[in-house]
Amino acid sequence: MLWRRLAAAAVAVCAVLVAPAPARAAECEQAPPKAQVFKGTPPEDEVYAPERLAPLATGKGVRVAVIDSGVDATHPQLRATVERGADFLHGGGAGDQDCVGHGTEVASIIAARPAADTGFQGLAPGATIVPVRISEQKEIDGKAVGDRGTPRQFAQAIDWAVDQGDAQVINLSLVMTADNAEVAAAVRRALDAGVVVVAAAGNNGADQSEGDTPYPADFEGVIGVGAVTLDGTRADFSQKGDYVDLVAYGQGVTAAARGSGHVTDQGTSFSTPFVTATVALMLERFPGLTPAQVLQRLQATADPAPGGSQEYGAGLLNPYRAITEALGPDTRNAAAPPVMHPDDPAVAALAARRAHSQQMALWFAAIGAGLVLLLAAAALIVRRGRARGWRPAGPGHP
């Protein structure tokens, strides 16, 4: 079917955000194609087990900004969780409409509500999605198709998500191939405000060159996410680099289609929202975590990966461990001095050695004093004997 071919080919939003988008109405030109409902439970949901997470946290009260192609708020599993948001691609308006489906897929992985006719749901169904539209560009057959915003608009979208959207987490399932000072500054402002920023590591892994650096994933403080297949090995499209902080499932991922039903897609675009959803669970369960503490917990609780850190970061995302494990302090306390107990055999032995030493010292002192007295007496006798000429003492020789 056409939608399956398009969904499998669409592996990233926005390779480069450079060209200004023409202003136009936000209504989509084409109605969404009819998509089938996924009847079973997707493999990634079987592994991440959102029903196991739900008694602990659902992301309730956590606001997640999805800066993407918008989010279709009419999807049955998203109706109760998507706000109006904002549209920076078309010069104003709301972000709760999606003409290409990418943002809808991302948002559903985060917060789709459970439904009776499918086993698919988001990992944080209690979270609130704040949709921010900035790009409708997708890669189809290796070519970028669709409108995309400028870097300045991208930076404005990030600022809006923090200042007006009150986001606590920002999901960026899009990639710029060049650094940009305005975007970097907007990301830094978000982090300084305590907002966690999660970004895709890029899909050029198969033909990656030295200059293929994904932004904003490479910015300091941003959580960069790579993709693995269902067997836990790195997907060949997932880029490698020190910007990969951890990995999550990103191949053959089930997500909500715009309108209704579900699609299967792949890319780091779709591994990223699994991490974002886990962050929402963490912020509900551990309020007040800083972005740095969130990253520390994600990496400390990740499952070991079969390869090096350039491919897998700290390892494979484990949402359950991330919200249940107790971590040690960031820094170690100074070691306490050893405490010796009276009934300790070592203490008793030490006391015996000290008593023996004291006794020996007293004996040596007594012997020494006796020798001194003996020498003094001998000296007196000698002196007096010499004075008498060594004659016996008597009446005439006192």
Image: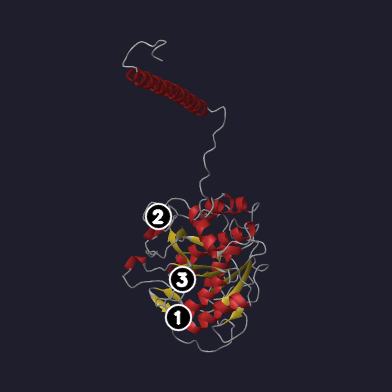
Q: Which residue is mark 2?
A: 233
Q: How is the image coloured?
A: secondary structure
Residue displayed at 59% across by 75% down: 161
Q: Nearer the viewer, residue 91 or 358?
A: 358
Q: Which residue is mark 1?
A: 181
Q: Where's residue 155, x and y in %?
A: 52, 80
Name the mark nearer the viewer: 3 or 2.
2
Residue displayed at 41% across by 77% down: 179
Q: Are marks 3 and 2 in contact (CB under 8 Å)?
A: no
Judge whether 352 appears above or below 51 on screen.
above
Q: Are marks 2 and 1 in contact (CB under 8 Å)?
A: no
| Element class at badge 3 | helix
Side of 14 relative to 319 (left or right): left
Please tell me which of labels 2 and 1 falls first in the chain. 1
Q: Which residue is mark 3?
A: 6
Name the mark nearer the viewer: 3 or 1.
1
Q: Where's residue 174, x and y in %?
A: 47, 72
Mark 3–mark 1 distance (CA, rounded to whole Å): 34 Å
What amino acid type is highlighted by mark number 2?
Thr
What amino acid type is highlighted by mark number 1?
Ala
